[in-house]
Image (cartoon, helix red, strand yellow):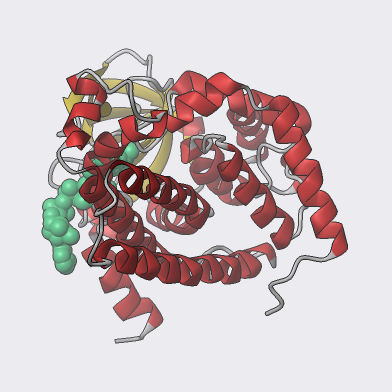
Amino acid sequence: MNLNFTAEELAFQQEVRQFLADNLPQHIIDGTANNGSVFVEKDIALEWQAILVAKGWAVPQWPVEHGGTQWTPAQKYIFSRECYQAGAPMLIPLGLLMLAPVIMAFGTEQQKQEYLPRILNGEHYWCQGYSEPGAGSDLASLKLKAERQGDEYIVNGSKIWTTHAHLADHIFCLVRTDPQVKPQAGISFLLVELDSPGITVEPIITMAGDHEVNQVFFDDVRVPVANRIGEENQGWSYAKYLLEFERGGGFSAHRIRHELDNLKQLIQHAHADNPHFDASGAISHKVARLEIDLKALEITELRILSDVSGGGNPGPESSILKISTVNLEQAVNELSVDVLGYTGFEMNPVAGGNPVRANYTASIVPRYLNNRAASIFGGSQEIQRNIIAKMVLGL
Ligand SMILES: Cc1cc2nc3c(=O)[nH]c(=O)nc-3n(C[C@H](O)[C@H](O)[C@H](O)COP(=O)(O)OP(=O)(O)OC[C@H]3O[C@@H](n4cnc5c(N)ncnc54)[C@H](O)[C@@H]3O)c2cc1C
């Protein structure tokens, strides 16, 4: 694989840099740096999304007929890297990168026309209704009941851990339409408006102090049959297709690169404060290990991107990516907290903040706490290993 960019690619890199210098507002950079959660604040994400939509650069992954860019894998890679380096936020992927590919692959023409433009322009803000109390790793055992009455389904039950349900206006849901057959065969995929009568959203506050996840209750909620994606009882295959994008759709390495750069800056501050800091070299050794692992992740992402750009979907290899990404990012989070030491708690914004340090230190402890959940959401690390054993290694 040739890792050097061509002259055209370097020119594109300059174009992206110039665009970011001219269009990425400082308050969006600050909001991103101070964010300790998995997604930035909705307002910030949507403002940046609108700026990218105006330029035609919001969804490089989409086919060009729906607003994609037709960029090469190298261009997508360069764009993503430059965005992170400039301090731009990740766009919220729930609608753009998770639901949209499913609608494109399995939705009707009418569904494509109705939903895709609204996902792109931010008019619709989606959340994901997969997990239930009692159905997480064993997702196929889900029970949210959808009984057909004429042109509608009557939906009863609940979804849990629903990220941003309190901010969203729509939820895509896996529902049980046939309880008599084997679990995977009786599931359908429904698109539901969150302001439908009978829906209640209750907050769940995490150990990081965030309100990010929720439980969503459905009490005789009426959903038009026209809101179903694809065939009745075929929802399991659409659900699995979506999960491949959730686990392996983007460039996490660039985000981790940004966090590792922040960690190095933190280490420089620690050296300036105390010349004996890391006298044994143990921290430098760990940073070198993280650098090597990050390089390996970057190359793996490039390889998978190259496959996907040929028209495929990420496939079970996305599970390998999820495991490596989570392990690496959590290791960077953990070392950052180690370097901060006890001052990390002073700098936690919940405890009042610390005006002496740079902004990015304020998010280190919240980010560490928040990112513990990455081993669980999107399918736990153990479940990813089961998938690799079965689908990749054929065990
Ligand atoms: C912060 C956060 C955000 C989330 N956001 C969403 C969302 O927006 N939408 C959504 O639908 N869901 C969401 N989830 C739910 C997430 O997908 C589930 O938590 C996850 O699938 C695990 O399910 P569970 O919590 O029921 O745990 P369980 O399935 O009960 O698992 C408990 C433990 O047992 C292990 N385990 C279970 N089965 C096996 C097995 N067969 N082999 C080996 N080990 C096993 C698991 O790895 C885990 O460690 C979110 C979760 C979190 C923490």
Taking 276 as reference, is 56 above or below it?
A: above
Q: Is residue 348 left or right of residue 126?
A: left
Count the marks. Answer: 0
| Residue name at image x 52 percent, y 71 percent | 300
Residue 123 shows up from this direction: no
Relative to the observer, which residue lies in front, 381 or 312? Answer: 381
Taking 188 as reference, is 204 above or below it?
A: above
Image quadrant holding the C terminus, namely bottom left
Residue 7 shows up from this direction: yes
Q: In this view, does 189 lie to the left or right of 143?
A: right
Taking 360 as reference, is 97 above or below it?
A: below
| Residue name at image x 18 percent, y 27 percent | 204
Image spot of residue 120 (x, y percent): 63, 31
Q: In this view, does 328 lie to the left or right of 15?
A: left
Image quadrant holding the N terminus, namely bottom right
| Residue name at image x 71 percent, y 77 percent | 2
Relative to the observer, which residue lies in front, 210 or 173? Answer: 210
Image spot of residue 314 (x, y percent): 52, 64
Relative to the observer, which residue lies in front, 265 or 321? Answer: 265
Q: Is residue 384 left or right of residue 102?
A: left
Image spot of residue 279 (x, y percent): 24, 62
Q: Quadrant of residue 170?
A: top left
Q: In which quarter of the image is residue 74?
A: bottom right
| Residue name at image x 51 percent, y 47 percent | 230
